[in-house]
Image (cartoon, rainbow, N blue to C red):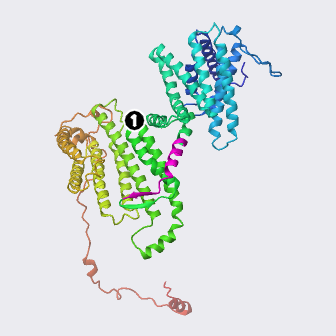
């Protein structure tokens, strides 16, 4: 019963939620067979593991265990005293008792995975990790033992065996017992494959997904046992998935780095644009050895998401290598200043190596942006073919931004130290710049077409043709270096077609403007008295705010009132009147003083 201050609406919602939880638990217990893998996968996806949050999932397992024990009245004593109870075969009439053990195992496993994430910075937590994994295996063994009862169907028995084999394999994997781990994973894989073949396609999806998760672990165990061909299969799996996740991710990356480090011991120099440079930094050697493999992986990537992830991985490794060179480059600055006095125009080896790595980084960034631009072009083309409910998945403005970044990267390439006097390199970059300028200009024109600015779009189309012809005229000796770039001939063909479409659209738009001239005059706000000669459908004429005349009327000029000025009066001389005025003389002291100060009577 809620307290009096508790809102009733909130209490009703809580009651409904509690009823739904109890109904779900009853549904789980009423089924004939317990689908362990489906229950585990749904719980993991809905409670944190979609984002790798193992702590959240562990909390969910604890809460679900509490709800199950309360529903089944399977309490471990009271709040004052703990009384251990075990699930036995006699009480297996309800499958929810099996879920108790399953949630115990999942809680221990999720805690182990959480500790695995934290063990990267705190190695002591690895001991706790192994303890939690052993606890999970112990619960899985108890689950498998209980499922041997006659009250459990065959499917549940197989799922319990597969779950037990999976956790055992993970424990042996962490202990680096490769043979035992491989046997456990193979057993788990075999059971899930049989279950996938025995049921419908919808039910088989989960089993096949678990098989795909296990396969890289099996190949990794085989490689550590001595199967050298497993390394190639691991790399192919990494390409198909765009990067491994979970238990194998860190181990596979460490294995690849270790393999490249062994090969790097024999690498001492690299040649680029006719100059051989010694490579003394181990991190740079490892990066350069894996460069060809990474580029091949990008070419073989099956989808855009995987390709984007591989591009980001390559750029991250390249930045680390550049940083390592930059640290060695700082003490080399003084030596470089002295060397420039004797041999101007030629940079040092470490500076040239830095330019080479920067070239790789900028070229990779250009390829990544170009790949993104191609995918956006496909989306834009599909959108033009089929408009769905006004939704716009891509716009020409998005492509303009990508080509701006590419052009900026090309400008940085021309400024690399040691390549200022390389005429062939500068010419090659200039041609590439013209190609991307043409495409950027083309999509700017497309954006103008969307807003019906026909003249601006036509001028930009002509500019595209100008850039494309310059590329064709200057690409004689640089055909091989321009193979990977978009074909300008296709762009010329597309621009010519767009010009005809543009002219037709402009003519149709002009006709529409003439036909709808009267409505445009209505929008100008002219009253009815000023448009008697033009017919138009004006809905405002039947409204209460009809515009008939300008009110109040505007001011109009009128002639001003004449003004008369008597100019002759200023030139008239009046006759003297002194003889007509009577003069009275003032006498005495008072009159004298008044006369002095100007007072007159």
Residue placed most toward the observer, 130 or 387: 130
Q: Is residue 11 left or right of residue 273?
A: right
- Look at the image and say whether residue 266 sits in the magenta stretch: yes
- Look at the image and say whether residue 46 sits in the magenta stretch: no
- Residue for point 57% across, 30% down: 49
How far across and down, in percent of the image, does residue 517 sit?
Answer: 20, 40
The stretch in magenta equals: 254-272
Q: Does the image show residue 63?
A: no
How far across and down, in percent of the image, does residue 94 sit?
Answer: 65, 10
How far across and down, in percent of the image, does residue 152 sit?
Answer: 61, 9
User: Helix, strand or loop at disc 1?
Assistant: loop
- Where the N terminus falls, by quadrant? top right
Q: Is residue 588 left or right of residue 73?
A: left
Residue placed most toward the observer, 424 or 44: 424
Res 175 → quadrant: top right
Few, some or many C-alpha atoms within 10 Å of disc 1 (few <14, some 14-19, many ≥20)? Answer: few
How far across and down, in percent of the image, does residue 18 sit?
Answer: 64, 18
Res 167 → quadrant: top right
Q: Is residue 141 left or right of residue 563?
A: right
- Residue for point 17% across, 42% down: 500
Task: Relative to 474, say whether 183 is above or below.
Answer: above
Q: Is residue 160 left or right of residue 75?
A: left
Task: Relative to 571, say whether 69 is above or below.
Answer: above
Residue under label 1:
303
């Amino acid at each position: 019963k809620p307290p009096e201050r508790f809102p009733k609406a909130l209490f009703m919602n809580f009651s409904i939620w509690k009823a739904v939880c109890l109904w779900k638990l009853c549904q789980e217990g009423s089924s004939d067979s317990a689908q362990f893998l489906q229950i585990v996968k749904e719980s993991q996806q809905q409670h944190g593991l979609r984002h790798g949050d193992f702590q959240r999932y562990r909390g969910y397992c604890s809460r679900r265990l509490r709800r199950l024990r309360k529903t089944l009245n399977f309490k471990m004593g009271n709040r004052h005293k703990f009384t251990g109870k075990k699930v036995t075969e006699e009480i297996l009439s309800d499958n929810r008792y099996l879920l108790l053990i399953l949630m115990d195992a999942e809680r221990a496993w999720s805690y182990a995975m959480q500790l695995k994430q934290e063990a990267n910075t705190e190695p002591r937590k690895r001991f706790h990790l192994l303890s939690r994994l052993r606890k999970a295996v112990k619960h899985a063994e108890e689950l498998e033992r209980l499922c041997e009862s006659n009250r459990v169907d065959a499917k549940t028995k197989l799922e319990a065996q597969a779950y037990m084999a999976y956790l055992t394999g993970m424990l042996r994997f962490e202990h680096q017992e490769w043979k035992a781990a491989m046997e456990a994973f193979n057993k788990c894989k075999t059971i899930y494959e049989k279950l996938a073949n025995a049921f419908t396609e919808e039910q088989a999806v989960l089993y096949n997904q678990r098989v795909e998760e296990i396969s890289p672990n099996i190949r990794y165990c085989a490689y550590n046992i001595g199967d050298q061909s497993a390394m190639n299969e691991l790399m192919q799996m990494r390409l198909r998935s765009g990067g491994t996740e979970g238990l194998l991710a860190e181990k596979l990356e460490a294995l690849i780095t270790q393999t490249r480090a062994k090969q790097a011991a024999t690498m001492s120099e690299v040649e680029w644009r006719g100059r051989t440079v010694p490579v003394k930094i181990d991190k740079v050697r490892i990066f350069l050895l894996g460069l060809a493999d990474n580029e091949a992986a990008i070419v073989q990537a099956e989808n855009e998401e995987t390709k984007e992830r591989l591009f980001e991985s390559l750029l991250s490794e390249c930045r680390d290598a550049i940083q390592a060179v930059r640290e060695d480059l700082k003490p080399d600055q003084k030596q470089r200043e002295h060397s420039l006095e004797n041999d101007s125009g030629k940079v040092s080896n470490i500076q040239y190596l830095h330019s080479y790595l920067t070239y790789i980084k900028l070229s990779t960034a250009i390829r990544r942006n170009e790949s993104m631009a191609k995918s956006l072009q496909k989306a834009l083309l599909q959108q033009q073919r089929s408009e769905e409910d006004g939704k716009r998945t891509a716009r020409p403005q998005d492509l303009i931004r990508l080509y701006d970044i590419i052009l900026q990267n090309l400008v940085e390439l021309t400024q690399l130290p040691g390549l200022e006097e390389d005429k062939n390199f500068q010419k090659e970059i200039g041609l590439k710049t013209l190609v991307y300028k043409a495409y950027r200009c083309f999509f700017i024109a497309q954006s103008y077409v969307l807003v019906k600015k026909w003249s601006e779009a036509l001028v930009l189309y002509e500019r595209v043709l100008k850039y494309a012809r310059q590329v064709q005229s200057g690409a004689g000796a640089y055909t091989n270096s321009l193979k990977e770039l978009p074909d300008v001939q296709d762009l010329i063909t597309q621009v010519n077609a767009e010009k005809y479409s543009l002219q037709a659209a402009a003519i149709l738009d002009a006709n529409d403007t003439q036909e709808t001239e009267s409505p445009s005059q209505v929008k100008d706000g002219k009253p009815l008295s000023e448009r008697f000669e033009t017919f138009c459908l004006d809905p405002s004429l039947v409204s209460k705010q009809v515009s008939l005349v300008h009110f109040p009327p505007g001011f109009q000029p009128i002639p001003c009132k004449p003004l008369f000025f008597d100019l002759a009066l200023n030139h008239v001389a009046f006759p003297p009147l002194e003889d007509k005025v009577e003069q009275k003389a003032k006498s005495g002291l008072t009159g004298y003083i008044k006369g002095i100060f100007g007072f007159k009577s």
